[in-house]
Image: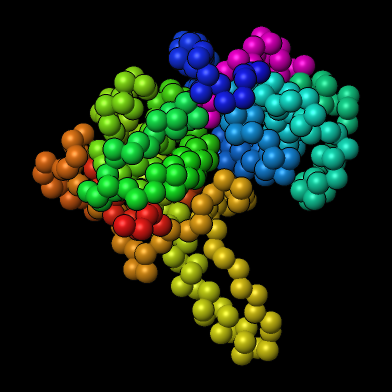
């Protein structure tokens, strides 16, 4: 959708937001009945890889995955055809969300290394045919809001100078906003990985990404009145979705710690064998088939990271009571996420690279 740059800062921001909220009420239903549903994550990762390669905006990437979800939900498509469908969804979404000069070109797509590994060569006629099929499937309506369409509006007030970090005033508001944007981008990618998040409204997923980020960053109150007024969601509305996001975060942190512990042993073995050791920094996202280096913050891990504990939530400046419950969940794929694994609360125990006090 062609929206003005930084529309959330303009005079029409509230009207645009209300139009998006109204449109999301009319989104097609997702039934999760595709025979290839177990391959969804692979093709979502493929879209993300190509999207990052061309530096497409998050809304184009999220719209492309949503188009893929709806198309797979309606048709039984072979694996080879799904490669063509995925890339066609990305091209269609980029034509709708991006400027014309940023839309990937056919020749550039065919020159990507991943295309040869998939043994796939795109043709102009094949892409036009697939794009026409997609447009007819969606009745030529690509005005489909995703969580990525709401986050910038929420981020505009996600951090305020009156917020507290671990009960203390923040020393650097701009640094806090930077970390908030990084974590919200990360949680947005988490929501893209699993079709379970399609059961929530896109605006709610975006609000849950902000809430999860505030928990990670130890900001209080976790869900201040200003965010409740802007989003229209009370804290109780966000708990189920926020829980799933935090469980996925715990899984990523555990995997990062596991790889970090394995690195010294591997380096020692390589040194004993006389091989050259290359030191690389761990990525925050440790997911199969795809990395998101442009959006992901650096790893935030404690030396002896334990399953997360949470305190009972209060929208005031401090918790009213303590009710700690431990979780230990391994998620691969993320579709195994339970409905209610633990109580999301005011503070999140995972260490975060926050702010010097």
Q: Does any portion of residue 288 appear in the rendered image?
A: yes
Relative to 318, residue 289 above or below: below
Indicate the colouring scheme: rainbow
| In the foreground, 39 or 229 | 229
User: Which quadrant holds residue 300?
Assistant: bottom left
Residue 22: x percent and y percent? 46, 10
Q: Residue at x 38, y 54 (%)?
A: 354
| In the foreground, 332 or 96 | 96
Relative to 188, residue 269 above or below: below
Relative to 302, residue 340 above or below: above
Q: Residue at x 40, y 57 (%)?
A: 353
Asked if residue 62 lies left or right of residue 174, the reply is right
Relative to 270, residue 106 above or below: above
Total labels: the figure holds 0
Residue 79: x percent and y percent? 70, 37
Asked if residue 226 lies left or right of residue 263, the reply is left
Q: Residue at x 37, y 69 (%)?
A: 303
Asked if residue 130 lies left or right of residue 25, the reply is right
**Is 149 part of what is drawn in magenta?**
yes
User: Which quadrant holds residue 157?
Assistant: top left
Q: Which residues are magenta?
A: 132-150
């Amino acid at each position: 959708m062609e929206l003005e740059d930084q529309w959330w800062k303009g005079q029409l921001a509230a009207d645009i937001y209300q139009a998006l909220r109204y449109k999301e009420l009319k989104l097609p239903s997702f039934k999760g009945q595709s025979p290839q549903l177990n391959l969804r994550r692979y093709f979502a990762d493929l879209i993300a890889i190509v999207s990052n390669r061309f530096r497409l905006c998050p809304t184009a990437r999220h719209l492309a995955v949503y188009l893929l979800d709806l198309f797979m939900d309606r048709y039984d498509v072979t694996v080879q055809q799904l490669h063509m469908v995925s890339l066609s969804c990305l091209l269609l979404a980029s034509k709708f969300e991006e400027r014309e000069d940023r839309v990937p070109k056919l020749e550039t797509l065919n020159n990507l290394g991943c295309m040869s590994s998939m043994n796939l060569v795109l043709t102009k006629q094949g892409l036009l045919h697939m794009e026409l099929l997609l447009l007819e499937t969606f009745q030529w309506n690509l005005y489909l809001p995703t969580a990525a369409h709401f986050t910038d509006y929420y981020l505009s007030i996600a951090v305020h100078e009156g917020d507290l970090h671990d009960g203390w005033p923040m020393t650097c508001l701009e640094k806090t906003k930077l970390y908030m944007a990084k974590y919200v981008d990360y949680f947005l990618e988490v929501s893209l990985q699993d079709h379970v998040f399609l059961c929530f409204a896109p605006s709610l997923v975006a609000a849950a990404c902000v809430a999860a980020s505030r928990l990670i960053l130890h900001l209080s109150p976790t869900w201040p009145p200003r965010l409740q007024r802007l989003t229209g969601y009370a804290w109780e509305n966000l708990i189920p979705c926020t829980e799933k996001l935090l469980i996925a975060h715990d899984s990523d942190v555990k995997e990062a710690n596991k790889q970090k512990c394995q690195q010294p042993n591997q380096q020692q073995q390589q040194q004993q064998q006389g091989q050259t050791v290359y030191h690389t920094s761990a990525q925050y996202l440790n997911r199969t088939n795809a990395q998101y280096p442009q959006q992901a913050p650096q790893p935030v891990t404690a030396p002896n990271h334990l399953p997360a504990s949470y305190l009972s939530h209060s929208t005031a400046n401090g918790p009213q009571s303590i009710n700690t419950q431990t979780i230990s969940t391994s998620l691969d794929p993320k579709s195994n996420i339970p409905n209610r694994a633990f109580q999301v609360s005011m503070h999140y125990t995972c260490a975060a690279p926050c702010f010097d006090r």
